[in-house]
Amino acid sequence: MPFQNKFPLHLPGEKSTENQNISLVAADVKQKDTTLGYYVSENGKLELKAKKEYNTQDFGLFSDILNLFLEEHSLSKPSRISIAVPGPVLNGKCTTENLPFDLDIELIRSRTEVEHITLINDLEAMAYGLKGTEDKDFCTLHKNSSTTKGNVAILAPGRGLGEAGMFWDGECLRPFATEGGHSEFSPRAEDELELYRFLKAIHGIVSWESVLSHEGLFNVYRFVRDMRRQEEPEWLTQKLEKGDCHKVIIDAALSGENRACALTVEAYVDFIAREASNLVLKLKATGGLILAGSLAVKIEALLKMPSFYQTFVISDKMENILKSTPIYLLKNENAILTGAAYYGAFGKH
């Protein structure tokens, strides 16, 4: 069965004549960069006509990015705009410290003169993005022999920690957003309690995002380096000072160049397994767990190791549910943009 068919999504407007032959701009807005795509719908599908990435910090309003995109590609004003945002959407607005501007449907409508505008959480959009995936976009980390219909969990460690779910209504899956990444980190062993105390002194409240994100990976590395007295050679210090610390740490770990980095990534994989297990149990996600995000993709080889799965299935009484949950890795980096487009085009009748 194609992966896309494993996740039948609730898109009630897919066959509506009102949603055919419309133009739509979808956006994946992130702290560092914003990607826009211009789509046209036909027969329940979307065709991408133009796409470009912009530096988010260069703009004071989202509408400025949109207008520049349309101008550079000589595109007409779209019928609809659908924006995936890195935060909660409340009453048509998203305010987050991660962006240089707030996102407000009414403000965007007034500045673009486009009536049909939607805001959607980026992990919820990623779930809708499964509609546009192919088999090559997935990797099966754990296959379950029995096929159980049910809810699906999505865990995506990247610049932040995204968590979302898909509710199985008996016929299809209905994506929904959560802010579970901001729930408090819970230490299990004595060394994790030491990590908790280390991070509490820095952050006050220690969330799972404080551990499972770009910054979180560096947090774990600092703990290993400083509290476990692991050596940081000069070449590593120089690379870390240049930025993108998460990439430097993972590369040094996978190559075996540095023990501190190896210990960091080993702990990191364990923490991903732990929080993935928590999310599956909270959502009763018998339909599957999908791991995504830049960090998960970068450590694919380690997620395939037996130690990840062995940690994932540890539970007081619910090992049977965890062992029956298939686990997939989503590697399509355009899933959020695609999902925003499908939601904007077909999310409503």
Image (tube, rainbow, N blue to C red):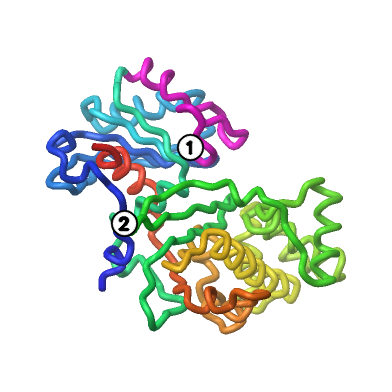
Name the residue that disc number 1 marks. Answer: 55
Q: Is residue 89 magenta?
A: yes
Q: Earlier in the sequence, mark 1 or mark 2?
A: 1
Spot the residue most to the top. Answer: 110
Q: Which mark is residue 134?
A: none
Q: Are marks 1 and 2 in contact (CB under 8 Å)?
A: no
Q: Nearer the viewer, mark 1 or mark 2?
A: 2
Q: Is residue 346 visible?
A: yes
Residue 199, position as x, y percentages in the image:
80, 54
Is residue 237 left or right of 179 when viewed as pictured?
Answer: right
Q: Position of residue 114 (x, y in %)?
A: 29, 22
Which stretch is magenta? 85-112
Which quadrant holds residue 272?
Answer: bottom right
Pinpoint residue 169: horizontal percent, then vertical percent: 36, 55
Image quarter hosting the C terminus: top left
Magenta-span inclusion, residue 219: no
- Asked if residue 34 is positioned above or below residue 64 in the image, the reply reads below
| Amino acid, disc 1 | Asn
SS for callout 2:
loop
> Mark 1 packing: few (<14 Cα in 10 Å), some, or many (20+)?
some
Q: Quadrant of residue 270?
A: bottom right
Asked whether 306 or 15 is in front, the reply is 15
Q: Residues within 10 Å of mark 2 (few under 14, many from 20)?
A: some
Label 2 amino acid? Cys
Quadrant containing the N terminus is bottom left
Q: Is residue 140 above or below residue 163?
A: below
Q: Residue at x 51, y 24 (%)?
A: 60
Give whichever of 98, 316 is nearer the camera: 316
Q: Is residue 149 left or right of residue 197?
A: left
Whether residue 91 is situated above or below residue 142 in the rendered picture: above
Q: Quadrant of residue 35?
A: top left
Quickly name the residue at label 2. Answer: 172
